[in-house]
Image: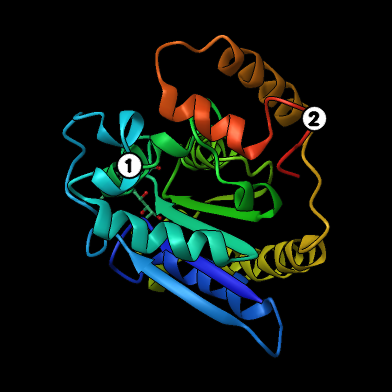
Amino acid sequence: MKITVIHGQSHKGSSYHITNQIINKILSDDKEIYEFFMPRDTPEFCIGCYKCFNESENDCPRSQKVQKIVSCMELSDIIVIDSPTYCYAMTGQLKTFFDHLGYMWLSHRPKEAMFNKVGIVVSTASGAGANKVTKALEQQLFWLGTSKVFRYSKNVNASSWEIIPKKIKESIEKDTSKISIKAKDKVGKVSPSIKLKFIFTMMKMMQKSNDWNMVDKNYWKESGWLDKKRPW
Ligand SMILES: Cc1cc2nc3c(=O)[nH]c(=O)nc-3n(C[C@H](O)[C@H](O)[C@H](O)COP(=O)(O)O)c2cc1C
C-alpha cells in the first residue's frame, strides 16, 4: 500500500504526531510512504501566469517541485494531509502548494487516478478552528476528484504535543485507531459520492461548450469523458 503524506508544517508538533499515529496504525506489510513537509517542499508562490491552465502543467515555473508531489499522490492509495490551525485556516505554505493544483480541479483537467483515493485530513488547534481547516482540506481533495475523505480535527488545548493533557491524548489514541481501520477498509473500494458525480456531470456539460480553453477541452475529449466514459 502506498501512502502520500503532506505535512502543512515542518515541525513535529501535535498535527504531525496525530498523523503519525494514524499512519502507523494502518498496518500493511508492503507499506510505502512518500512524505513531504511544507515549507521545505513548498513550491514558490503561484505567480498567476496561467501556463498550467492554458498550456501545460509542465510549463509552470514551479513544475519540478509541484510534479514531484503530484506523481506520488497519483501513485498512492491513501493521501494524508495535516496542518496546524493558524488563524482559523491551514498554514500559508500548505495553501501555496494547493494553489499549484488548480489545473487538476474538476473544472479543468482532473487526474483519473485521483478518483479512487482515500483521503485523510487532520488539523489541531489549541481552542477553535481545526474543524474549519479539515473542511478546507477536504474541499481541496474533493475538487481533485477524491470524495472519500476522513476528517479528524482536534482541539488539543496546548501549543505543543508534549503538553497536551493526558485525557486528550488518550482520546486521540482511540480516535486514530478508529480512523486508521476505516481508511484501510476503504482502500480499493472507493466509489464516488453523489455530489462528486453531480459536479462531474456539470463540468462535462461545461467542457462540451468550452470554446475558451482547448487544452482542457481536448483533455476531456481524449479521456472519453465527453462521451460515456467515466474516471471511476
Ligand atoms: C500563528 C498561529 C496561529 C494560531 N491560530 C489558532 C487559531 O486560530 N485557533 C486556535 O485554537 N489555535 C491557534 N493556534 C494554536 C495552534 O493551532 C495549536 O497549538 C496547534 O495544536 C498547533 O499544532 P502543531 O503542534 O502541529 O503545530 C495558532 C498558533 C499559531 C502559531
Q: Which residue is mark 1?
A: 100
Q: State left or right for residue 215 relative to residue 26.
A: left
Mark 2 residue's CB less than 8 Å from ligand 1: no
Q: Is residue 198 visible?
A: yes
Front residue of 32/128: it is 32
Query: In the displayed image of the protein, which residue is found farthest to the bottom?
Result: 29
Q: Amino acid at mark 1?
A: His
Image coordinates of residue 19 in percent, x first then y, are 52, 67
Location of the N terminus (image quadrant): bottom right
Could you tell me which secondary element the residue under label 2 belongs to?
A: loop
Q: Is residue 209 above or below residue 160?
A: above
The residue lying at 32 percent from left, 54 percent from top is: 66
The number of discs equals 2
Is 54 placed above or below 116 here?
A: above
**Residue located beneath label 2 in the image:** 228
Disc 1: CA contacts within 10 A as few (<14), some (14-19) or many (>=20)? many
Q: Amino acid at mark 2?
A: Lys
From this view, report whether residue 28 is shown above or below residue 167. below
**Hey, which quadrant is residue 49 in on the image?**
top left
Of the 4 image quadrants, the one containing the C terminus is: top right
Residue 22 position in % (x across, y down): 61, 70
Report the side of 177 relative to 141 (left or right): right
Q: Nearer the viewer, mark 2 or mark 1?
A: 2
Q: Which one is nearer the viewer's eye here, 93 or 219?
A: 219
User: Which one is nearer the viewer's eye here, 30 or 168?
Assistant: 30
> x%, y% of residue 87?
31, 36
Q: CA distance from mark 2 to mark 1?
A: 30 Å
Q: Position of residue 27 (x, y in %)?
A: 71, 82
Q: Residue at x 58, y 66 (%)?
A: 76
Element at badge 1?
loop
User: Which residue sits at x=56%, y=9%?
Assistant: 209
Q: Which picture quadrant has residue 35? A: bottom left
